[in-house]
Image (spheres, rainbow, N blue to C red):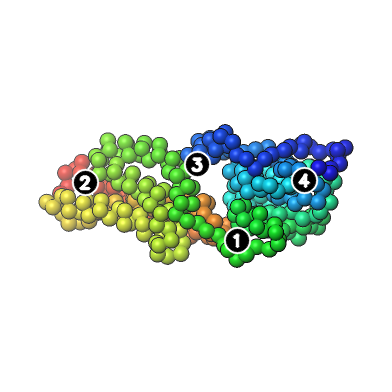
Amino acid sequence: MQAISDQTVDTPIRNTTSRLAWPDHFDHIKARLGVNRMGHRIEPGLFTIGAPSADSPVFVSANYTLSFDALRSALSGIDGYILVLDTDGVNVWCAAGKGTFGTDELVNRIEKTGLGAITHQRTLILPQLGAPGVAAQDVKKRSGFKVEYGPVRAADLPEYLKTRQATPEMRRVHFSLVDRLKVSLVDLIVAIWPMLIAAVLLYFLGGWRPALAAITATLAGELLFPILLPWLPTHDFSTKGLILGGLAALPFALLAFMGNPQAAWWLRLAAGLAYLFALAPVTGLLSLLFTGSTTFTSRTGVKREIAAYIPIMAWIFGAGALLTIGLFAARLLGVQS
């Protein structure tokens, strides 16, 4: 490796390999299960893979272990450098949206590692999904390094390096059912305890039906929504989720409407609407939160959805809560007609 040994840097240059060991796979399993959710990170800095020279390619990654491991495992037989940015243990796509995989961090990491004195070539290969956070012209102006966006998937890098040209397929973002289930599993595990606590409270307050309804609304948002995402109507995640939540709540609403035929029709209607109004926004909110797990939403789009639909969901849920309180009071007073 041709490098300047007397270059003063904040962190030493470390070596890595393309081979993933059992501890790496175990870390991936824990990450997928949401265990120690923000703890899957490596120390940012400069890594070598293979035996790079001063003319070897430089790749850029986040310090989220799954992102780093996906990159290095794709570089089998390739000599190069990996510049790892401090993204607080967040993957490239999400960190780019938050700004931590961004221009300032990239320029600062170039300076801290002394990269300019280690390599002769002045091109950095970034993952395509990091583009929203990086202003290539600013990086060039401030550091002298040119930003080049590689393919979406690290697995395509060996082919990409042959021509330094990405094919249309390399640029295409896929978010398959398997991909959606991988990320939804983490959200589901995080939601399990709040869901169970709410279900237990509702069981003691109203019986098995509202408890089961709460579980259904949560599972619809955390599991069913990712599965059905491409086929649900409308464009916005919030409206998709509200529609799905309404469908999930519909059986409970019908049971509430038909379950007490001796009661006045307006009481039965109120009971049905209480389920619809209380449950649909829960599924809608969880569906909106799923935008942070996808690769085909934008930061501005998410902000627009939050501003447009959170108030609507709050009003709908509030109406459901008021109906529920009113029905509870009517039951205590013995109102039937």
54, 115: nearer the viewer: 54
Disc 4 vs disc 2: Cβ atoms closer than 8 Å? no
Say which element carries label 2.
Answer: helix
Q: Which of marks 3 and 2 is nearer the N terminus?
A: 3
Residue 123 location in percent, x, y? Answer: 77, 55
The amino acid sitting under disc 2 is: Ala
Please name the residue that numbered disc 3 is placed on.
32
Chain-order first, disc 4 or disc 3: 3
> Label 1's element?
helix
Q: In this view, does 167 lie to the left or right of 325?
A: right
- Identify residue type, mark 3: Arg
Q: Residue at x 50, y 38 (%)?
A: 29
Q: Of circles 1 and 4, which is in front?
A: 4
**Residue 240 against residue 55 in the figure, above or below:** below
Tell me the distance, in whole angstroms, between the alpha carbons under discs 1 and 2: 62 Å
* Horizontal relation, residue 262 to residue 295: left or right: left
Q: Nearer the viewer, residue 163 or 147?
A: 163
Residue occupying the far top of the picture = 23
Determine which residue is flagged by label 2: 330
The kind of residue on which mark 1 rests is Met
Which mark sits nearer the N-terminus, 1 or 2?
1
The local crowd at label 3, few if under 14, some if 14 to 19, many if 20 or more residues have their Cα within 10 Å, is some
Label whose residue precedes the other's in the sequence (1 or 4): 4
Q: Which residue is drawn at 75% across and 51% down?
A: 57
Single out the mark in the foreground, 1 or 2.
1
On residue 52, which mark appears? 4
User: Is residue 272 left or right of 116 when viewed as pictured?
Assistant: left
Crowding around mark 2 (Cα neighbors within 10 Å: few <14, some 14 to 19, many 20+) is some
Task: Tell us which disc is closer to us: 1 or 3.
Answer: 1
Tag shown at residue 157:
none
Discs 4/3, front: 4
